[in-house]
Amino acid sequence: MIKKFFDWLKQPLGLIAVGIVFLGVFSAVAYGIYLTQQTPEQPIQFPHRTHVAFGIQCLYCHPGASKGPAAGLPSQAKCWACHNQIAKTQTSALLAPLKDAVINGESIQWVPVAIVPDFVQFNHRAHVAAGRNCEECHGDMSQVDIAQNPQVFNMGWCLNCHIEAAGDDQEKLVKLSDCGTCHY
Ligand code: HEC
Ligand code: HEC
Ligand code: HEC
Ligand code: HEC
Ligand code: HEC
């Protein structure tokens, strides 16, 4: 029975069947990868490029990065402080959802793109205090229209930099590679 099946696989029809199965699996995998690489649908198409080009500092909108674990996202009040003075706000379709949120007093539900699982303890403050730039981990946001994650925040990525940062300092190496530093 099995042998018959394998013989059949070698026939033209069998080869076509193998091809179809292979293509099916391949495209399913490719589609899965494609989905994880897609920029999420955000409530407002917020362009980092435009804002950074105006000289607005990262920490103005993400002040938590120098103070604690989370960088934080700006409230709509912070957006509005500028946008109620900008003529384009009245006419831009991209800004219509911001106007609606302000009028209705609703907060904007941004979809996270830079994120690690809950069982990982990441803290911005320690990194900013150690002189690390946003760019080292988030890429050059001044060139980004809609934010997406330029790299995978996996364990190897964290550890590689930690080992490099520790250098010859054994005590630091033990601390920065200890499981309990990132998982507790
Ligand atoms: C005018 C305010 C503003 C400025 C300035 C700004 N950002 Fe943002 N940032 C936002 C908003 C709003 C979001 C949420 C929307 C999104 O993810 O696209 C965001 C999202 C992000 C994210 C993704 C966070 C997530 O939700 O997962 C990163 C990373 C980020 N910003 C880094 C930076 C860096 C680095 C700079 C400086 C080069 C910067 N931002 C400057 C407003 C700002
Ligand atoms: C410090 C001032 C400032 C802050 C804060 C700010 N913006 Fe802006 N934003 C601007 C300027 C300036 C422009 C460019 C306007 C122009 O092209 O005429 C702009 C452009 C935009 C655009 C593109 C509009 C278009 O039609 O091209 C969007 C969308 C936008 N901002 C959303 C936001 C959101 C959402 C926030 C809050 C998270 C925010 N902005 C905070 C100054 C600011
Ligand atoms: C050492 C790497 C690293 C550096 C440096 C860094 N970040 Fe992050 N950032 C991360 C990681 C990892 C996450 C995901 C954290 C999580 O899910 O808890 C993140 C998440 C974020 C987020 C979204 C979630 C949140 O924390 O509110 C924003 C916004 C952000 N970073 C902005 C910044 C800004 C602005 C700077 C520079 C002042 C910066 N980051 C510096 C690694 C870094
Ligand atoms: C680009 C380099 C870099 C990357 C990437 C990086 N770190 Fe760090 N991390 C550092 C440096 C530098 C320090 C500070 C070391 C010191 O104490 O001088 C640090 C310190 C820490 C600390 C210790 C805070 C304390 O108690 O002092 C934690 C926790 C941490 N990192 C978690 C993470 C996690 C989780 C990731 C990955 C999601 C990560 N880091 C990615 C460079 C990095
Ligand atoms: C510098 C920070 C850091 C240190 C130190 C660290 N981890 Fe992790 N760990 C991470 C991050 C970030 C992830 C999330 C990986 C992802 O999402 O792909 C993770 C994921 C994991 C997972 C889940 C694996 C998976 O595939 O989902 C396990 C288990 C784990 N770590 C165990 C450990 C053990 C055991 C140690 C000590 C030998 C350790 N970690 C040290 C940052 C760290």
Image (cartoon, rainbow, N blue to C red):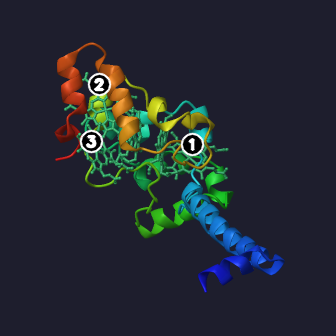
Quadrant in which residue 18 is drawn? bottom right
Q: Position of residue 124 (x, y in %)?
A: 31, 36
Q: Is mark 2 within 8 Å of ligand 4?
A: yes
Image position of 97 (left or right of 171): right
Q: Is mark 1 within 8 Å of ligand 1?
A: yes
The residue sitting at the top extreme is 168
Q: Are marks 1 and 3 in contact (CB under 8 Å)?
A: no
- Please state which amino acid type lies under the numbered disc 2: Ala
- Residue at disc 1, secondary structure: helix
Q: Which residue is mark 3?
A: 69
* Placement of 4 over or under 66, stated as above or below: below
Q: Position of residue 173 (x, y in %)?
A: 24, 23
Query: Which quarter shows the N terminus?
Result: bottom right
- Please state which amino acid type lies under the numbered disc 1: His
The residue sitting at the bottom extreme is 1
Out of 121 and 66, give the one closest to the viewer: 121
Q: Which residue is mark 2?
A: 129
Q: How far separated are the C-alphas under marks 2 and 1? A: 24 Å
Number of numbered labels in the structure image = 3
